[in-house]
Amino acid sequence: MMSKIKIPTEIWVELYAELSGYVEEYSALDPIYDDNGQRTPESDDKFCDIVDDVESILSNFFIKQEEG
């Protein structure tokens, strides 16, 4: 079994945000943002779902190092 790499929480957040944003933009069939530059409710829900999946994948390889 491979040992998991500990990464600081801020890096964990940057990583899941970057990967989730990429997946969302790459797979989007509908607009992600409205005319005011705000996320649409549908894209917000989809992004949260993507984040859950990405964090699940990250947890297979990394451990989020809690601060303190």
Image (tube, rainbow, N blue to C red):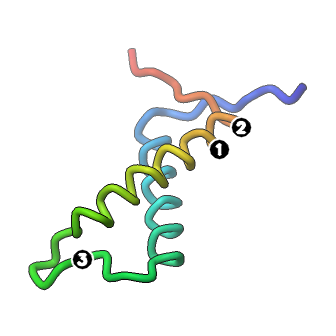
Question: Helix, strand, or loop for circle 1?
Answer: helix
Q: Residue furthest top?
A: 68
What is the distance, in whole Å, between disc 3 and disc 1 at their CAs? 26 Å
What is the distance, in whole Å, between disc 2 and disc 3 at their CAs? 32 Å
- Using residue 33 as the reference point, say whether residue 50 is left or right of it: right
Q: Residues within 10 Å of mark 2 (few under 14, many from 20)?
A: few
Q: Nearer the viewer, residue 31 or 60?
A: 31
Q: Nearer the viewer, mark 2 or mark 1?
A: 1
Residue 51 screen position, x and y as percent: 46, 49
Mark 3, residue position? 33
Are the residues at dot 2 and dot 1 in contact (C-beta closer than 8 Å)? yes
Mark 2, residue position? 61
Residue 3 screen position, x and y as percent: 80, 26
**Which three-letter amino acid code belongs to the residue tagged 1?**
Ile
- Residue at horizontal 60 percent and vertical 39 percent from the top: 56
- Residue at horizontal 90 percent and vertical 25 percent from the top: 1
What is the distance, in whole Å, between disc 2 and disc 1 at their CAs? 7 Å
In the picture shown, does residue 54 fall above or below 37?
Answer: above
Question: Helix, strand, or loop for circle 2?
Answer: loop
**Which three-letter amino acid code belongs to the residue tagged 2?**
Phe
Q: Which mark is residue 5?
A: none
- Residue at horizontal 52 percent and vertical 25 percent from the top: 65
Residue 52 screen position, x and y as percent: 49, 43
Are the residues at dot 2 and dot 3 in contact (C-beta closer than 8 Å)? no
In the picture shown, does residue 9 fall above or below 51?
Answer: above
- Residue at horizontal 22 percent and vertical 68 percent from the top: 39
Q: Residues within 10 Å of mark 1 (few under 14, many from 20)?
A: few
Mark 1, residue position? 57
Question: Helix, strand, or loop for circle 3?
Answer: loop
Q: Tell me which corner region of the image, top left, top right, bottom left or bottom right, holds residue 7.
A: top right
